[in-house]
Image: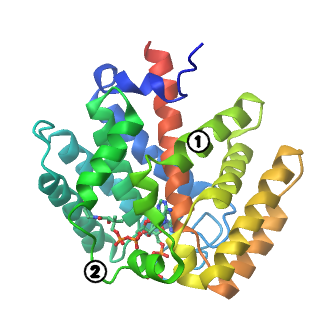
Amino acid sequence: MIRMPLYAPLTTICRTLPDDRLSEAFCRGARRELLLTPKPGLVDVFDNGSHDDLNLIVMQQSIDLLPLYYHDLMAITLSPFDPEVVRTVGLAAEERMMIHCGTNTHKGYVFLSGLVLLALRYGRDLRHNLRQLSRQLFAGGRQSGSHGVACQHLYGCTGIVGECLDGLPSLFEHGLPCYRSYRNQGMDETRAGLALMGRLMQVVEDTTSYHRAGMHGATVIRHDGVVLEKRLAAGGQVEDWLVQRNHYYRQLNLTMGGVADMMALTFALDQLLDEEGAAS
Ligand SMILES: CC(C)(COP(=O)(O)OP(=O)(O)OC[C@H]1O[C@@H](n2cnc3c(N)ncnc32)[C@H](O)[C@@H]1O)[C@@H](O)C(=O)NCCC(=O)NCCS
Ligand SMILES: Nc1ncnc2c1ncn2[C@@H]1O[C@H](COP(=O)(O)OP(=O)(O)OP(=O)(O)O)[C@@H](O)[C@H]1O
């Protein structure tokens, strides 16, 4: 028997859900990530983690800008696909974020969520669409001087580009199945969200971690991800330990923005799967 991938029901989501519900799912995914607390090194309800330029308010303001971006993406003609048109819409969203928030609050999530929304619009095989779209979008090369390019040269970490070219394995082979499995086992949203964070800390090749604290930083996050997920799966308490790890990450100036972006994406697709299930 051929087992359909968990995300298979999403192939028709763009035919069953109105645009504003799609947009709301991606915004809500980012909001759920932001509010999940405590998150070592990241902005949450308790503090700004290792980010002097970010805080809860500015991250929320950034999320409030996203519907404009998704509206523009949903208006793009899909055939023939023109990567320059998509790139222009994406760059406009990044510029809007910089103008209104003064810093790159959700740079990674803007790219990732836009890519997934486009892939959903094409329907059929979501991961095939993601690989195809990524190949076309990255064919023109990347913004020079970025931290991601530097990390690829220094550490061989392919970051967001490798993740997208491979069809988002951290999302479809880890994040989504892991989160939905913990929820189906009866874990509440917060604990399942923290377990999701633990799993993504183990599998995401996050350039923000390498950029901030090199190979040591990336190793710390991978190790902590194992501890976090194991403790939660065993029914243990983790909040005090996470608060202590946040203090340690701040001392190292360590963060994990890519993990945060992939968490937000997982929450967004989790909501779309629930809505698809409700609609069918
Ligand atoms: C690819 C992007 C991120 C630019 O690459 P760049 O090298 O500048 O980014 P960099 O590698 O520094 O990472 C940016 C962000 O990605 C996130 N990230 C890092 N590692 C990972 C990872 N493994 N997985 C997911 N996200 C990650 C982090 O939050 C980081 O802040 C993107 O901004 C871009 O190309 N924009 C141009 C407009 C465009 O094409 N948009 C498409 C809309 S569909
Ligand atoms: N809750 C969050 N806290 C911090 N970063 C987050 C959060 N959610 C998502 N991110 C992602 O992490 C990125 C910020 O990470 P970081 O500040 O390390 O990137 P950078 O700007 O490339 O590096 P630097 O700030 O050192 O110049 C955001 O652009 C966003 O994509």
The location of residue 210, given as percent across then percent down, is 56, 78
Residue located at (74% from left, 81% from top) = 248
The location of residue 125, given as percent across then percent down, is 37, 30
Q: Is residue 109 left or right of residue 177?
A: left
Residue located at (45% from left, 76% from top) = 152
Q: Is residue 270 left or right of residue 19?
A: right
Image quadrant, ligand 1? bottom left
Q: Is the residue 38 above or below the residue 4 in the image?
A: below
User: What kind of residue is marked 1?
Assistant: Glu
- Label for residue 144? 2
Q: Secondary structure at mark 1?
A: helix
Residue 191 seen in this snapshot: yes
Mark 1 and mark 2: Cα distance apart in space: 31 Å
Residue located at (44% from left, 60% from top) = 162
Q: Is residue 110 left or right of residue 205?
A: left
Residue 51 seen in this snapshot: no
Residue located at (60% from left, 12% from top) = 1
Q: Is the residue 135 above or below the residue 188 in the image?
A: below
Q: Which residue is mark 1?
A: 173
